[in-house]
Amino acid sequence: MKKIPVTVILPVKNDAKSLAQALEKLGRFQKVVVVDSDSKDGTDEVAAKYGAEYVIFRWNGQPPKKRSWYLDNHEIETDWVLFLDADEIVSEAFCDEVERSIAKYDHAGFWMTFQNWFMGKWLRYGDPFSKLALFRHSCGRYERVADDGWTNIDVEVHEHPVLDGTLGRIHSPVAHDERRGMDSYIGKHNEYSTWEANRYMALGPQGSGEWNSMTQRQQFKYRHVDKWWFATAYFMISFFAKRGFLDGRAGLVFASLKREYYSHIRLKILEMRKNKQAPSQGSETNHKVAGVVEKDIPVTLIIPVKNEAKNLASCMDRIGRFQHVVVVDSGSTDTTLDIAKEYGATCIHFEWNGHFPKKRNWYLDNHEIKTDWVLFLDADELINDAFCDEVKKAVTSGNHVGYWLNFHNWFQGKFLRHGDPFSKLALFRPDAGRYERIDDEQWSGLDMEIHEHPVLEGSVGKINAPIDHNDRRGLDSYIRKHNEYSTWEARRHLAMEADDAKAWDALTTRQQFKYKHVEKWWFKWLYFIMCYIFKLGVLDGRSGFVFASLKRHYYGHIRLKIREFKDGVPGSRSIHES
């Protein structure tokens, strides 16, 4: 068979699950190249199986990124290149049209249309996307965006080729079939929204060269994405005007997740503007160790950390009264450990093997504790003198074996006086129990007990003085963490359904209600109404609304992941199958 004179290039990273189905359809093209960012999942073996050339790319954080790097540094035997992702699958009709079009038309490149496979269904309506991915490499390169390490994205995602010549369109759609599921989708789009917010902030005045290289759709987006109405307008157009509702529940979820995406871009833009006007206090370098403080609280304070340099100093400033301070680190790559040592904390390395125990129980089981009490505190949790005084009194009273702690949230630099503050059981006698054992079969990358709580033999009291919860790492970190949390909670929900009554008895009343109902469509809305209306989150202004909305998204993600895990991640079919 005569080959189509096009070099197909697939930028990948840990895409073994998707790559095989993409390579299987590319046999008609003259050459296929897999450009890999040092995958660990057997991506190289998949490429070899299908006879693709395999190239390693290691990004240094500066331009060029992966696509431009390949074009600039490798000899390309054909006039044409086609860039595809591992989750993009071509059809025979697409190959036929490409072969005809590059022979018939004197264009510099062709726009391509993509049809989404989402939640086990082809989305035939809504807002399918297009991109310029088939072009003559002699006619141009991907636009160069001054990405100053905005994210870890090492490949051009929102950039497009700037070509010298006319453009056509390939009408046969390419299937976009992401097999890695909801966790991957939300995680990727969190990175994308961070990148887009940074690009928005870096753009020059409208009408400058940067704007001129954009498509009309891109120009409209960057003019208006910081407006409150933009995300909702996208939803209305995609779901109603473009008839996404005809795709049923999958169409609604897809349009809703895209609305979340544009909302996140706006929120990150607002956060960046605020940080630019008033740089955050408590950065990695902005701290100083307090003088000698009497260690009058007979408690071992344990802080589990990973890359907490932005938070840790503010936490450490306030804990000098505790008899022993231990920082348990999971391989931080920032200055977390330097800060901990500067404050005189004992530093211990923890490396999770993917099985029980996780970080907190591991420390309790494997280290000598010289006090009768332990307090687990996160690096973004800030105590005060009133709290310390109450803890000192409580642990010497002999009344209880553990205490619930109250937390007040800081969000977007504002103290939330209303809404839904949280509590957790984190001060207890280690001889009274351990964190509940959950056989977490690597449900997520979480190496520490987050939603688990100690199961204690004895009575439990409450510390009334609140702790401030103030994570300074921003919305990107918040969304990334809660994506992991929602995956874990979805897995636990499924495990709870199969567990006996004893497992349910270990839960608090609030946990029992959550796991009984979180799969229901109304649960996320009930939480929002309770938090924002009945608990007066509305009085906290925009920050209260955003906080309640993000929590609504969180519970919505748990429900979507439960449904996905129950149904299984569906495999691909041809676009033309119904």
Image (cartoon, helix red, strand yellow):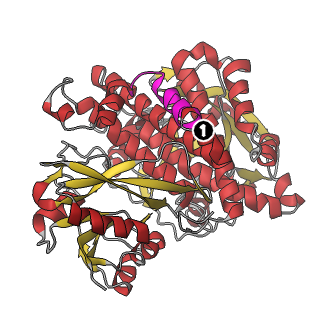
Quadrant of the rendering where the N terminus is positioned: bottom left
Instruction: Name the residue at 66% across, 65% down.
Output: 568
Seen in the image, is 229 located left or right of residue 251? Answer: left
Image quadrant in which you'd find residue 432: bottom right
Vertical placement of 528 versus 66: above or below? above
Where does the image place residue 17, in percent across and percent down from the top left? 48, 72
Q: Amino acid at mark 1?
A: His
Instruction: Name the residue at 28% across, 24% down.
Output: 276
Vertical placement of 18 versus 276: above or below? below
Other residues around mark 1 within 10 Å, as few (<14) / some (14–19) / many (≥20): many
Image quadrant in which you'd find residue 199: top left
Q: Is residue 516 visible?
A: yes
Q: Which residues are magenta?
A: 225-240
Residue beneath label 1, please? 553
Residue lying at the far front in this picture: please name it. 104
Instruction: Name the residue at 55% across, 32% down.
Output: 241
Q: Is residue 1 magenta?
A: no
Q: Is residue 471 visible?
A: no
234 or 524, nearer to the observer:
234
Where does the image place residue 449, in percent across and percent down from the top left? 61, 54
Quadrant of the rendering where the C terminus is positioned: bottom right
Q: Is residue 236 magenta?
A: yes
Seen in the image, is 319 located left or right of residue 28? Answer: right
